Image: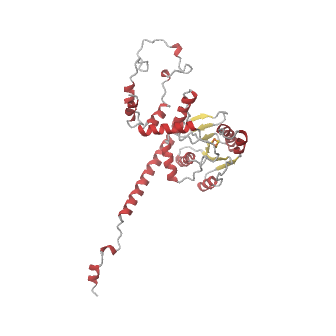
Amino acid sequence: MNTATLTETAPETDAPTDAPTDAQAEAQRQAKRAAFEANKLSKRLHRQVGQAITDFNMIEEGDKVMVCLSGGKDSYSMLDILLNLQKRAPINFKIVAVNLDQKQPGFPAHILPNYLQNLGVDFHIETQDTYSIVKSHIPEGKTMCSLCSRLRRGILYRVARELGCNKLALGHHRDDMVVTLLMNMFFGSRMKGMPPKLVSDNGEFVVIRPLAYVAETDLEKWAAHREFPIIPCSLCGSQENLQRVLTKKMIREWDKQYPGRIDNMFTAMGNITLSHMMDRQLFPFTQIKATGQPDPQGDKAFDEDEEDCATPSPSSGGAAVQTIRLFD
Ligand code: SF4
């Protein structure tokens, strides 16, 4: 048989080839893109958490930090990032992850111990049936959160004491802090937010929020990327505070329409001009006398809002210019 003929007549498509098909090439491109995005996200999260820790001196040499783990995306991410930062930190500090199993119906009690064991981190699961206590004290249909939180707080303080922890890390993020500020304004008539660091109400511990600079959308992406075994947060059957849900929805919608708005509101929380507010406890308005000296911080009588609004903040990426249009 003439082998040359065979070769010539064989259809080209039958020949084995290493070249990827269009679909394979597209899949490779997408995988590369996803890896690139995940790497970028990882860098951003670690940088923001490291920055918040540094800015507020959250963690110091010799600290033992109790990382409160609920099984939600935020606390998983916090633990994940803190463990990575601990490896590179120039100081020594300990981490112990703590979860409070409140005996809510359907709580998958095995998930967190399995996850934490595989991670090789120190951990403690505290089991206390606060669910039954709350249920027996609060009439059906009434919100249980206030009693539930009070009980949880007391238990966590005791556990922190028993474990020898001096700091409590909570997984609240940037959006939680902005929403809290707005909620306090809307419903409490107070300019009061959620601090990145503060002494606990019993005076015994320092409470830190290492995710203070992190956007919630980034935590959603990180949790999906890291495939954390998320435990649903609605097991107790109590509705999440409706006003909080609405306020969060509101700031998300604003941010979609005017990108950078959440960031600007958040930045404003650390950039307060007391003389331009009206808290008489914090600024001595009653003592004010003309000094005869020009003062750029003085009252301009007619504020040049447009000028202020047209100056984008470093984090807004130019969004402040759009802000002005909303109020036109
Ligand atoms: S939502 Fe449920 S678990 Fe959370 S504080 Fe309220 S009652 Fe407690």
Residue 9 at what x, y percent from top left? 27, 79
Side of 158 relative to 62 (left or right): right
> Which of 243/260 is in front?
243
Side of 102 relative to 268 (left or right): right
Residue 144 at what x, y percent from top left? 66, 39
Residue 274 at what x, y percent from top left? 50, 23
Q: How many numbered marks are there?
A: 0
Side of 232 relative to 45 (left or right): right
Which residue corresponds to the image point at 40% horizontal and 19% vertical from the top-left? 302
Q: How is the image coloured?
A: secondary structure
State which quarter of the image contains the C terminus.
Answer: top left
Q: Is residue 190 above or below residue 66?
A: above
State which quarter of the image contains the N terminus.
Answer: bottom left
> Which of 242/304 is in front?
242
Could you say which quadrant of the image residue 62 lies in? top right
Which residue corresponds to the image point at 50% horizontal and 49% vertical from the top-left? 222
Which residue corresponds to the image point at 57% horizontal and 35% vertical from the top-left? 197
Which residue corresponds to the image point at 48% horizontal and 44% vertical from the top-left? 217
Q: Quadrant of ligand 1?
A: top right
Side of 138 relative to 324 (left or right): right
Residue 286 at what x, y percent from top left? 53, 14
Task: Single out the residue that lies furthest toward the front.
Answer: 141
